[in-house]
Amino acid sequence: MTGADIDAPSGAPRFDGRRGRWVGASVPRREDPRLLSGHGRFVDDIQLSGMLHAGFVRSTVAHGRITELDLSTTREVEGVVAAYAAADLGLGDIVALLDRPPEEFVPTAMPILARGKVRFVGEPVALIVARDPYLVEDGIEAAVVTYESFGAIVSEESAFAEDAPLVHEEAAGNVLLDVSMFDTPGVDAAFEAAGSGQGCVVDVVTRSGRQNALPLETRGVVASWDDRDEQLLVQTCTQVPHQVRTVLARSLRLPERAVRVTVPDMGGGFGQKCVVGREEIAVAAAARLLARPVKWIEDRREALTAGFLAREQRYRTRAAFDPEGRITALDVDVVCDMGAYSCYPFTAGIEPLMAAAEMPSVYQVPAYRVRARAITSNKAPTAPYRGVSRPQYVLAIERVMERAARELGIDPVEIRRRNVITEFPYTGVNLVTYDPGTYRESLDLAEATLRDEGWYEVREQAAAEGRHIGIGYCCFSERTGYGSEAFAKRKMKVVPGFDISEIRMDLTGSVVVTSGTMNHGQSHETTFAQIVADRLGVHVDKVKLRQGDTERIAYGWGTFASRSVTIGGSAVSVAAGRLGELLCTIAAHLLETRPDNVRLDGDGGVVQIDDPARRLSFEDIADVAYLRSHLLPKDVEPTLSATASFDVAGDGTFSNATHAVVVEADPGTGGVKILRYACVEDCGVVIHPQVVDGQCRGGIAQGIAGALFEEVTYADNGEPSAASFIDYLVPTATEIPDISVSHLETPCAFTENGAKGAGEGGTIGAPAAVLNAINDALRHTGVELDATPVHPRAVLAALDGAGQSQIPPRKEASTRS
């Protein structure tokens, strides 16, 4: 893709007649001067007069009953201002609900502070408030808590055991969700035919390790009560400020007008911050009781052990293929370990329901059956994390494709070509309609990239030299712009979807636009300004975005699931369009001509079509609107503002990509080095190419982390293994390769700007592509790995046993389309 580029020396983007002046240009990011010069303002930068600091006494056992909680000594510690147990705060629980029958879904109440029972190591038991963070730690150490310990549930096997203790008494068998879907006709017949010699049946069990989203900025909150406004001001790093306001108000039993949530700059979220945590509610309650500002900043140990986690899933995927390598049926069993509680508002169903609904991915699957379960365990709760089950179900279906290719003697790329969706719109067996994309084209281009660069020859030469190089691919789609209709299909009681924007022009012709989305690294200040600048025909510097304040718009659903540009950006575009119509209406009246005889001129004004010499600048129009309103048309109010909402009907829009990876396995250490990483992606119209490339590369880095490094494990007693970066292995720049990103473009027909989402795609494809490349490198050993992260010991074990199994030679495609 080529967009507008930057002219020297002026720095103004060249006009691109196809895309418009601003959209499609990698203009300098508006956020950079502030953030790169150290002038960003994050939660921990906030200092208020008389501010106190908070911390939490946290459970040291994974599963047990609190038999004693004595805070009397804590309250006597010098500098401690208050110490609260659950009964002292009297807060309402957080309860996330699905509109499903009891046999399908069991809700769990998550108390703000544990009452009676604790369910994971790190669960907050008491809140300590003191003059500074060090005194808080002294107060925490003085607290006396004793427990009666129960057996801990730390695995699928222990959750399903006949004598397993129950994490929640109401959740029989430790199951929170159990849903069977899409048992379409023909599943059993397809397996019978494939198993009788007419093709093949593959059975793959894939697993993924538990991960932390690991935003650079940990969670934090500063809460203060304003007597004058009779309002609780909560400044926090959340992806969905209105949602936090709603839960805060309900938990504290306040009207929503009495709660204002604002978000300063935020250092990453990745989904972990799109759910409501307990800590910000407890801190807000303390601030109200004490009538003083209170700050809590999560430390890294808390973030790793007690913050929301994700990803721990197991798939048993059976697939039937005909002799030509075309899939005829899919039968899947999904189990997701969701930890101790349901997150709000998505519930414990967020991961299994996502997997069940979208498992067929980019492939034409004629018959489908799936059972999806969420189990509860004595681990920190699960929240959405970049991709939400898609890295896992894509891993499962891509491993199926690799296994079938091997059994049928078909090239792995070719078997994908025979199965990917090529005609659009396509309604799948999962009743999801996929809008046009470039599934086949991205696969072809990714393969061509590696072939043209000679990697296939490098692999064969390496094998002759005793080196272990492998090539792997992953094809996938990413549903983006989930509207309320798509979320409602999950039967959520709280249904996200729409977004609202307001735009207002001042006397100088500059505009301020508000959005319910929430920037936490995606460059909204730049990309939304580009959208507005094109729609109104003004310089991008005349547009200012305001986000992260519940007082500015009635309601908004924040930023998650790649929805910002697709839904938030569309709302912004519609609002800008309505403001443009208002400007034209006023200009037509002032020019004494018909409304259909004027248009925006693309240079900050309105021109008369049949006489272009007659023109009014936006400043001219604003002067009348605000300072000489008696000259306005009778039915036009004295303001230059417009509001719009936007929701995506139907199933949303689908970005797509293919990732191609070359790896080398080290026979001495079992380590895996990525030699080449190529991404071919299609996210519709690219608003800002540099930003999209950054999203791709950042997502791929997180996907590589899940494939090779990051994992939280637990001892039998429920103690988490990773309390610091010594134990939780985070890749550095040394482990992440250079990543090339190529763009295809299929504009979306039902977003205002033609864009599809780009936030999660990189993460989705990386685990499968890396694992497939590793298995290709280990092909001669007879070993196939089906779990992530891939540990060096597993690679070493495979290489040590090389030659014990006979593996058919690689089958290469004879032609490439």
Image (tube, rainbow, N blue to C red):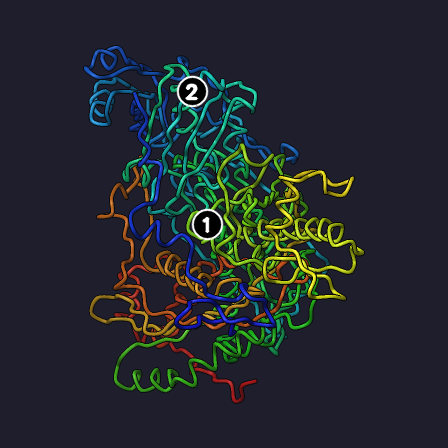
Going by the image, does 119 lie left or right of 433?
A: left
Q: Quick check: 634 above or below 270?
A: above
User: Which residue position is annotated with label 1?
Assistant: 313
Kind of residue at disc 2: Trp
Disc 2 to disc 1, how far (Cα)? 42 Å
Coordinates of residue 88 in the picture (x, y in percent):
39, 13
Residue 225 spot, x, y in % from top left: 42, 20
Q: Is residue 276 above or below residue 540?
A: above
Label 1 environment density (alpha carbons within 10 Å; few <14, some 14–19, many ≥20): many
Is residue 195 visible to us here? no
Look at 59% across and 54% down and name the residue there: 566
Residue positioned 26% across, 20% down in the render: 130
Asked whether 566 or 624 is in front, the reply is 624
Q: Quadrant of residue 767?
A: bottom left
Question: Is disc 2 placed on a helix, strand or loop?
Answer: strand
Using a 10 Å C-alpha cutoff, classify the residue at mark 2 as few (fewer than 14 neighbours), some (14 to 19) or many (20 or more): many
Measured from the top left, where is residue 759 in percent x and y?
48, 56
Which residue is farthest bottom? 814
Q: Which residue occupies the foreground of this view, 302 or 182?
A: 302
Residue drawn at (55%, 76%), measured in percent from left and top?
Answer: 415
Q: Nearer the viewer, residue 173 or 34?
A: 34
> From the viewer's perspective, is residue 381 above or below residue 565?
above
- Residue 4 visible within the image: yes
The residue carrying mark 2 is: 225
Left or right of residue 484, residue 76 in this image: left
Residue 56, by quadrant, is top left
Q: Amino acid at mark 1?
A: Gln
Q: Is residue 378 left or right of residue 365?
A: left
Foreground label between 2 and 1: 2
